[in-house]
Image: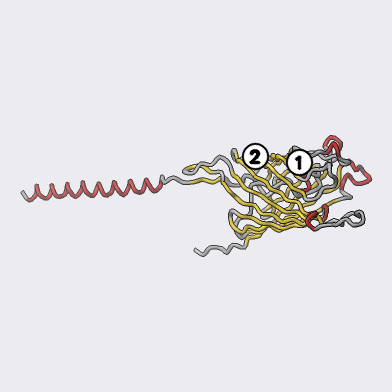
Amino acid sequence: MKQIQSIFIGLILLIFSGNVYSQDLDALLNAETKPTVDYATATFKASRIINGHSIEQMKKKQLDFRISHRFGTLNSGAYGLWGLDQSVIHFSLEYGLKDWLMVGIGRGSYNKTYDTFAKFRLLRQSTGEKWMPVSLSYFTSVELNTLKFPVRPEGASNYFSSRLAYVHQLLIARKFNDKLSFQLSPTFIHRNLVKSELDQNDIYSMGAGARYKLSKRLSLNAEYYYTYNPNSEFLDTRYYNACSVGVDIETGGHVFQIMLTNSQGMREGSFIPQTTGDWLDGGIHLGFNISRVFSFQKDKKW
């Protein structure tokens, strides 16, 4: 009788211990299969596609020191060493205040322009528990032209506000796979002062840019800005849509971009409304951007 009781008690304990083990196993499997959110990364290699901003920005406490250079036009011929005798340059410091907020200041020799900007990340492309098909950022900048005012009729006034131009832009990007990324950049530019009453103070433009990854450290980029209301047929100077192609080369902490573009200006307020180069006539500028990123984030202690 005692043997039967012992066997019965042992069976009960085995059943209950099996249930407890099964519950622990179910909890472990549920933890391992908990829904996650996977965000798209490295949609573009740098914060610029070529001239225009990309969806990328500095993380919190990261500083990007950028040097941009554009030479003269290739159609200047041997006398101008195919543009190498002439050049403009732009320096900028761009900092991540937050992972979603980047600010920057810069100065360029083209029109002796100072500029400042902010870029806000609004949405991130993601899959998993949270699905978002595109990344979205808002970019805004102010540009200050410091060229000397031309001689004006007696009694006419020159205002500081006349030197200012404002840019507003949405950056809408999607990374289709490990190789291909695409971005649309609807843009609005307001210039307080233009050369004549036939010119436009308000400019509307649609930018499109793409990146194709060729290898781990090399990619091919293209960029085009279509301006809806240039009004250039009534002006002394003919303006064209900005069109550029280039390559990105990553070398450790540097990103080196080399390009061909019909724009010598390197900020939205200049290269979108004031591009004078004609690709079909050799009005093409060789140029490059160099980006060096510094991190001020303290290393975590484990």
Q: How is the image coloured?
A: secondary structure
Look at 26% across and 49% down and name the residue there: 20
Please state if 65 lies on the left or on the right of 179 as rendered. right
Question: What x and y, as percent, mark residue 213?
Answer: 65, 41
Label 2 secondary element: strand
Question: What x and y, as percent, mark residue 208?
Answer: 69, 39
| The residue positioned farthest toward the right in the image shown | 79
Is residue 129 in view? yes
Which mark, residue 118?
none
Which of the 4 image quarters holds residue 154?
Answer: bottom right
Please state if 12 lies on the left or on the right of 107 as rendered. left
Please state if 31 lies on the left or on the right of 302 as rendered. left
- Which is nearer the N-term, disc 1 or disc 2? 2
Amino acid bearing label 1: Ser
Is residue 64 in view? no
Label 1 secondary element: strand
Look at 32% across and 47% down and name the residue there: 25
Question: What x and y, as percent, mark residue 254?
Answer: 69, 54
Residue of label 1: 244
Q: Alpha-carbon neighbours of circle 1 within 10 Å: few (<14), some, or many (≥20)?
A: many
